[in-house]
Amino acid sequence: MSAPVVTAWMRQDGSDVRRLGEELGSLATTLDRSERELATTLGSAATALGWEGTMTGRADAASVPTGSLTGRFADACRAAGAALRTLAATMSWRGPAVVQLLAEQEALLADPPRMTVRDDLGGEVRVVDHVARTRLLDDLHSRLREHSDALAQKDRACRDALAHVVEDLGRLVPPGTSPGFLRSLAPPGAYGLFQDTGVVDTDAEEALARRIRPGTPAQDVRRLIAEVPVGRLDEFLARHPHVAAVLAEDWDHATGEDPLLDALLEAVGPPGEHGPQVSSVGAVRRAWLQLTAEERARLRLLYPTLVGSTDGIAIEDRVLANRALVRHALLRELAVEHRLNSGPTTAELTRQEAARYEDATGSALGAFGHWLARQFLASDAGLFVHDAPGVDPDRELAESRARIDLYRSLLLDAPPAPRLGDTSGIPAHLRLLLVFDPRGDGRYAEWHGRVDAPNVGILVPGTYSEMASIQDYSTEAARIARDHAATTATVSWLGTDLPSSIVSDASRRSFSESGGTHLLRFVEGLGLAPERDVSLVGHSAGGAVVGYADVLGVDVDRVLHVASAGTGLGLSAGLDYRSTTWDGDAREVVRYTQTAPGDPIAVSQDSGWLTDGTPLGHGWGHEDTFADWVVLDTGRTEDGQQIAGGTQAHTQVFSPGSTAWDNVVGVITGGQVTPYDPEWHWWHGRRSPYHDSAYPGTPTVEVP
């Protein structure tokens, strides 16, 4: 039995935690007293002044805003104190028990049990009794694990409770509330408590916020807020969105401003053709681990755009940085939605454009020119040619609302795949957003499920994928982690630009080259232990991204191409994948592929003779013909219909309940998949037996 993980805090008796919990409880009592005194004072004043009837009612009402605010703050302090005292109660006896067991383990290892045996000459010698030693160690580890698991469970519960308290405190003072108005509501003692705990600005912070105007350079903002303690900075930025906005829109970072930033940028190194070099990920990880908790928090708050998406930085720090970016993106997107909703519709804009074209063409073509302009501008082709912001407001409005829904979900909704039993220490209510960049089509990556899951599947979507459309895809990725919560986590990864058009974009190899490099760096940045099984799943153009990362030597165990546009680079006859990772470690990758019969993506898969930039295909070959690949059958949909023919077959391979979907799940979880076992027909050649509705189904096989 392996030794359990026992961290330093598990050896403590919880006295410090208990003391803090008691202080919070005392603070709650003080606030309760202030609330009662306020109500009594106002009531006494009303009586003394001889107010009656309506006037007395107004005096009572005057006490409600402050009483409500003070009472809610007291409730938050009471809840936090109770959570800490509960944890302390568990630590009070389990901590000393852990210390005692560790001492017994140390003594056992120093002086293991021995037994007497005879040597080759018949004499007696004393040797270690390994059987007894192992039995005693297993018993110690079992008792240690009982305590460590119980402590970890109480710790997670305490963290979750405190996280909810922090959110409740943040909602006490809505953004935009005048400090003067709030000060007028609260009694002096209560308002001082609010300032001390970071619920409202101190006088210095209030003055500082007034000095920062929209448009102030980010470097100047960071210089000004350097005087705010790190422990108060997060709340300060939440109270002043205009200050946070400057930091959230600063994507260009240069050395010379901050020694901590300089050290991090040095670790990242100079960018290559497709971003930072993969070799820099390890340097970033080492540099980040050398920082103190306060230094990490400072960098995260002051440089959220850098910390949020830099591979090699710890997951929790990236998550918190990206959460700040989402808050700002939501505010910006709400303004965009308001503008679009107040403007002309697509039909109204089309009529305006048609009139303009009629004026331009009328003199030359007469009535026919007018008719031609109206027909063209009203067609999809007309909108496609003029596919620019402001040309199709209806589409832009729908996309804006989709982004708003996503951002709100990321901030307010619970994770779609609960992290049951997770030992990472990251608060369970946080969405684990590892990449977030709202510029352009957007970049996004979210981890679903346990951070310590033994199986990890990274799913890459295909053509047309962008921030406005990623939520449905992400929901399906999270479904796998939710349905296999004990063993599997997934990542929905849109960490690169993907083609926005089959004709003009999908044939460009640059998308997969850039995307594959970003994906390789992302996987390396996760720092997954060698004993964990990691799978890459690429759909459509996402398959070409996965394939390129595979060619570069991404450190994974399994690769699945789902209706993939190609396999990475070069030869339609097959690819010579390297047997080592990008940095020279040995690797063994099992590669799977599935494409539904009649899927039009076959044009791209089979077009190895086409050159880069031609209207069709990547020139990377049809992986379903490679001898060393495991070809899977896409089978049937959940309702029993074969997945075959047309563009619907291209999307049905990702429909839950289908054979193809079960294959995706099987590869990621290390379960079972359905192999392609074609039948031969003299007319049709090789084809899937699933064309026959009476076919019972191909037996599944285990994933190695």
Image (cartoon, rainbow, N blue to C red):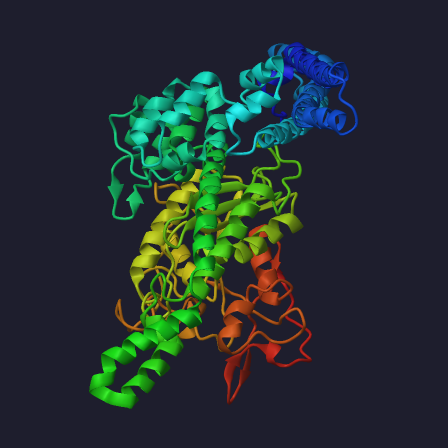
| Screen quadrant of the N terminus | top right
* Residue at the (56%, 33%) spot, across then down: 174
> 453 or 336: which is nearer to us?
336
Q: Is residue 129 left or right of residue 494?
A: right
Q: Is residue 687 shown above or below 112?
A: below
> 141 or 445: which is nearer to us?
445
Q: Is residue 242 left or right of residue 650?
A: left
> 268 or 569: which is nearer to us?
268
* Residue at the (51%, 89%) spot, across then down: 683
Residue 95 locus on image (x, y percent): 68, 14
Residue 506 locus on image (x, y percent): 35, 66
Q: Is residue 590 shown above or below 354?
A: above
Residue at the extreme right? 53
Q: Is residue 339 shown above or below 681?
A: above
* Residue at the (56%, 55%) spot, across then down: 667
* Residue at the (53%, 73%) spot, across then down: 648
- Does residue 648 appear in this view? yes
Residue 578 locus on image (x, y percent): 35, 51
